[in-house]
Image (cartoon, rainbow, N blue to C red):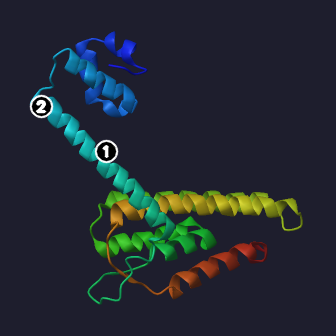
Amino acid sequence: MKGPFIERVKAQSTEKLIKTLLNYSEYQDQYVRSAEKELIARGIQLTPDERKEIENKKIKDKEEIEDDVNFRKFLMGGWFRYVVKDESAPELFSLTQIMVCSVLFTGLTGGILFTYNLLKLKTTKPIIIVLVLILSTILSICYVCAFYYLYDPSTIGSRHIFRSIAGGNMFVSLALFSNLWWNYIGKDLRYRSKSFIIPTIIGIIIIIAFLFRDQIIN
């Protein structure tokens, strides 16, 4: 047997080598292969239960990899993939609508739209709905506070601050609502896209109230 791990593998006990095979994902592939060859050289065979455990782990790992790949495809262009015109499909606010509202009108608006979807589907535990509202509210408060205290339209530097705040809000919103949609609404759910008029009006009202906050207060 040749390989960079030959001396290290030969120094290991049989129990350690078996443990290496059972926890193969924690080691380099070449080291695992060397451990497997060393066990064969020692005349040691895995029990049926051990082989089944390894096989189940490989299946699970493969599913996780596929899920990760599909999720990245979902982020890059799957927002419109499952929007249909079938009247039997549920009518929901699309992920695109939620993201646009979150970026333009803060995360709370996106959280409200997302919560509407969860309530419409009636398949989610109440704790998830509460979690969505709490997370979106925190995101909204952080965004508004940062904008209010850091942005000054009279200074050039504030433009860079504004871009940073808006970019951070967009990134967090994307990560938050995409993951929530993926896990709690369904990666393959076909649905009709609900009208964007009402959330747009609500969002515009929020923006106007914020821009003219001083006049409103006085």
Kind of residue sitting beneath label 2: Asp
Q: Is residue 48 above or below residue 201?
A: above
**Residue in the image at 57% along x and 83% along y:** 200
Q: Secondary structure at mark 2?
A: helix
Q: Which mark is residue 49?
A: 2
Q: Give coordinates of residue 71: x percent, y percent.
A: 42, 60
Quarter holding the N terminus is top left
Please identify the quarter of the rendering in which residue 78 is found. Answer: bottom left
Single out the residue that lies furthest toward the left.
Answer: 48
Q: Is residue 206 visible?
A: yes
**Residue in the image at 50% along x and 66% along y:** 76
Please identify the quarter of the rendering in which residue 143 is found. Answer: bottom right
Q: CA distance from mark 2 to mark 1?
A: 18 Å
Q: Is residue 62 above or below residue 90?
A: above
Looking at the image, which is closer to me, 64 or 92?
Answer: 64
Looking at the image, which is closer to me, 53 or 165?
Answer: 53
Q: Residues within 10 Å of mark 2 (few under 14, many from 20)?
A: few
Number of residue marks:
2
Q: Give coordinates of residue 5: x percent, y percent.
A: 40, 19
Q: Which mark is residue 42?
A: none
Describe residue 92's horizontal placement relative to residue 22 as left or right: right
Kind of residue sitting beneath label 1: Asp
Q: Give coordinates of residue 89: x percent, y percent.
A: 29, 83
Q: Earlier in the sequence, mark 2 or mark 1?
A: 2
**Residue in the image at 59% along x and 78% along y:** 203
Residue identified by numbered label 1: 61
Q: Is residue 123 above or below residue 128?
A: below
Quarter holding the C terminus is bottom right
**Residue in the image at 51% along x and 58% along y:** 175
Looking at the image, which is closer to me, 187 or 13?
Answer: 13
Looking at the image, which is closer to me, 85 or 200?
Answer: 85
Mark 2 near mark 1, Cβ–Cβ under 8 Å? no
